[in-house]
Amino acid sequence: MAMAYSSGPPNGYAGNPPNNNNCTACHNSFDVNEDGTDFFFTQAPPESYEPGTTYNIELYIGREGQERWGFQLTALDNDGDMGGTIEGMDDGFTQESTLGDITYLKHTSDGTFDGNPDGGTWGFDWTAPDAGTGDITFYAAGNAANGNGNNQGDYIMTMAMMVPEVAGAGEPDISLPWADWDFGPVQVGSDSTWDMRIVNEGDADMVIFSIQSDNGAFAFEVTTPIELADGEEIDIAVTFSPDEVADYEGIIFITSTDPDEGTFEVPVSGTGWSPSPPAPFSLATPEDGSDVSGTVTFGWEETFDPDPGDQVVNYRLEISASANFTDITSFDNGLESFIQINFADYPAGSTWHWRVRAEDGNTLGRLSTEAWTFTIDALGTSEQGVGLPLNFAIDNIYPNPFNPTVTIRLAVPSNEIVSVLVFDVLGRQVADLSRGSLAAGYHNFVWSSDGSAGIYFLNVQAPGFEETRKMIYLK
């Protein structure tokens, strides 16, 4: 067995955990680490290692009176796993062997230096592990043998040497939580700020040499260089200031000591805009020149604000006795596109002008495309329907806009065949309210829409009479 081990001892006898076995398992003539035997590194591992760096190391054993030499060595981290890689010199004196995931370096037959009284020296390369591994401990056992062909009379030595990782010896790693940033719409003459967070996710200090923008609309105030320890972060305030209505794009360049990134590029974008009034819109009801009385429903098309963001439009009904609206009575109506006004106290026979102003909060707003008139009916609401009407007419549509039921009142001066139909905006008939004879007088027709909101058209036909009115269904 002793002669067999001269070509290399079995693995697991370098004095390393978990079993801490060494060569005294067989060579037990003396206590381990008997005085008088030299066992040390003639070229030692570093006091602290740089991750990924390769170091050349030499191990020596010698004792007076002995003439054959052997060893076994490994390097483990604090978890008992292999710490880096070990590779012997290409001289035939060493060999590598594994037990599980652990590599052991040991002598060969030639590496026993049989008959040499000066001791044995073995060289090898150790490549340090990745950053963050932590402390590495070298475990080694040596045999100063007498060459008598058996395992008696040999001296066994052991050693353990811990080598820490260099503090901050890893690599910096620049990282941004946001790989790009869109400022969205920003009003011309204003600005918006984004805190660009830069993080060092590496395990070494990082230096940011410069931060630059290729577009002057994206600016920041920063003094470089900036030092960030591992795990540290910093916020750089980037301001977008558009000077015209346009789409903007740019790149922020960050140059640091991160070896993998070089220059880190952060795309940025934004849109410059100027306030615009709400879109044009038309009046709907009552129609221009209508005779009204009592409570009247005013309605108009809804409009929208083309400005970006959550802009809202509020409506204000304006009524004036003057066509140029020099004296205005206003009715604020919020978001609703219809309002009911009672004209019972207005002078009968008086004519009024009306229009609607749409306001968005950041412009002077927009007036409706029309300004219509209405006249207070001299009969008044209480007089309508008394006696027979003199002329055929659509007397009233109320409420208009409606939701979802509307009442249509017809004035019929004599017995007539009357058609009362409702069409949608595509010209499709959606309701048939009458196609027969109606007696002279006032007739009410009630219709409830089961379709979508929007504009509908009431068409009434009788001998010598046809009229179409717009009705608005609002939800």
Image: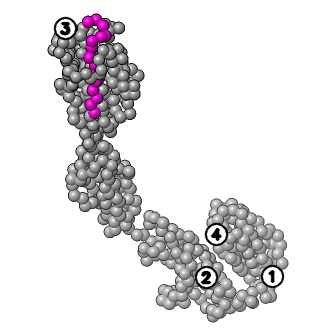
Q: Which residue is mark 2?
A: 289
Where, quadrant-wise, is the C terminus in this rendering?
bottom right
Magenta stretch in the rendered image: 148-162
Q: Which residue is mark 1?
A: 441
> Which of the two discs, 1 and 4, labels the residue nearer the N terminus?
1
Residue drawn at the location 27% of the way across and 37% of the way down: 164
Disc 3 marks a residue whose amino acid type is Gly
Q: Which residue is mark 4?
A: 474
Find the distance from the CA under tag 4 to the CA under tag 2.
24 Å
Where, quadrant-wise, is the N terminus in this rendering?
top left
Find the distance from the CA under tag 2 to the CA under tag 3.
129 Å
> Which of the two discs, 4 and 2, labels the residue nearer the N terminus?
2
Q: Secondary structure at mark 2?
A: loop
Q: Marks 3 and 2: in contact by CB < 8 Å?
A: no
| 423 drawn magenta | no
Q: Is residue 471 left or right of residue 216?
A: right
Find the distance from the CA under tag 1 to the CA under tag 4.
30 Å
| Of the two numbered discs 1 and 3 in the rendering, the one whose residue sits closer to the viewer | 3
Disc 2 marks a residue whose amino acid type is Gly
Query: Viewer-proximal residue, 211 or 299?
Result: 211
Q: Which residue is mark 3?
A: 115
Residue drawn at the location 68% of the way across and 70% of the way down: 403
Query: Viewer-proximal residue, 38 or 40?
Result: 38
Find the distance from the CA under tag 1 to the CA under tag 2.
24 Å
Residue drawn at the location 30% of the way across and 7% of the way down: 150
Image quarter of residue 82: top left
Q: Marks 4 and 1: in contact by CB < 8 Å?
A: no
